[in-house]
Image (spheres, grey):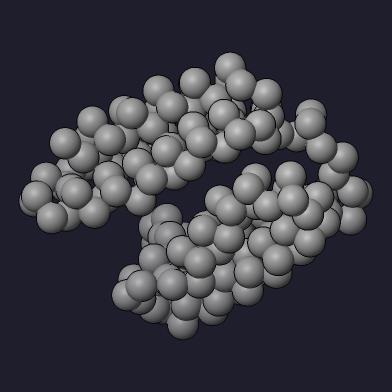
Amino acid sequence: MANALTFSRIALSVALLAPPALSPAFLVVYALAGVTDMLDGYVARRTGTESELGARLDSIADLVLVIVCLAKILPAIDVPTWLWAWVAAIALVKAANAISGLVVEKRLVMPHIKANKVAGLTVFLVPFAIPLFGITAPAVIACAVATFAAVQEGHYIRMGRAESPA
């Protein structure tokens, strides 16, 4: 059941290619894809069907959703240069965290901390906010939360608490 939800997210991601970016139809399909992302891990844990395959499928489904959303949304909006710089800075901090994790833990670590989950939810909500508020306000909020999460993630890794509970 969990893997079926994950596969449905891939199908929904591909379906996002059809409607115009940020249209009501796009946002409905996007919301459904988001629900499958929230449910697949929960279902796997509740049914005792967690697996390496499921984790890999989840990562693939997430990647497909992100690529499709970027391909659809970015051409439809005007992203200011300062926002690109902020997103790049967050990406650099996340990359530094990954390198730090390799040094400290001798393996790739991705802490499951509440701040990362809140950042993920905040970023997920941005497409719903763009039609109402434009890109600036939603992006500032999402980037602020993501910056905090990236810094906190680095702190947890460097303190040797990469497996901190969420």
Q: Residue furthest right?
A: 81
Residue 62 in sight here:
no
Q: Is residue 119 left or right of residue 6?
A: right
What residue is drawn where x is 79% and y is 61%?
A: 137
156 and 24: which is toward the camera = 24
Residue 8 higher or lower than 166, as above or below = above
What residue is drawn where x is 55% and y is 76%?
A: 152
Q: Is residue 107 left or right of residue 5?
A: right
Residue 52 higher or lower than 26, as above or below = below
Q: Residue furthest left?
A: 48
Residue 113 higher or lower than 107, as above or below = below
Name the quadrant containing residue 71.
Answer: top right
What residue is drawn where x is 44% and y is 44%?
A: 34
147 and 118: which is toward the camera = 118
- In the picture, the quarter occupied by the C terminus is bottom left
Name the quadrant containing residue 36.
Answer: top left
Residue 109 % position (x, y): 41, 60
Residue 81 % position (x, y): 91, 49
Residue 124 % position (x, y): 56, 51
Q: Residue furthest top?
A: 18
- In the picture, the quarter occupied by the N terminus is top left
Residue 125 higher or lower than 2, as above or below = below
Residue 87 % position (x, y): 74, 54
Residue 50 in sight here:
yes
Q: Is residue 57 left or right of residue 143?
A: left
Q: How many marks?
A: 0
What residue is drawn where x is 68% and y is 24%?
A: 20
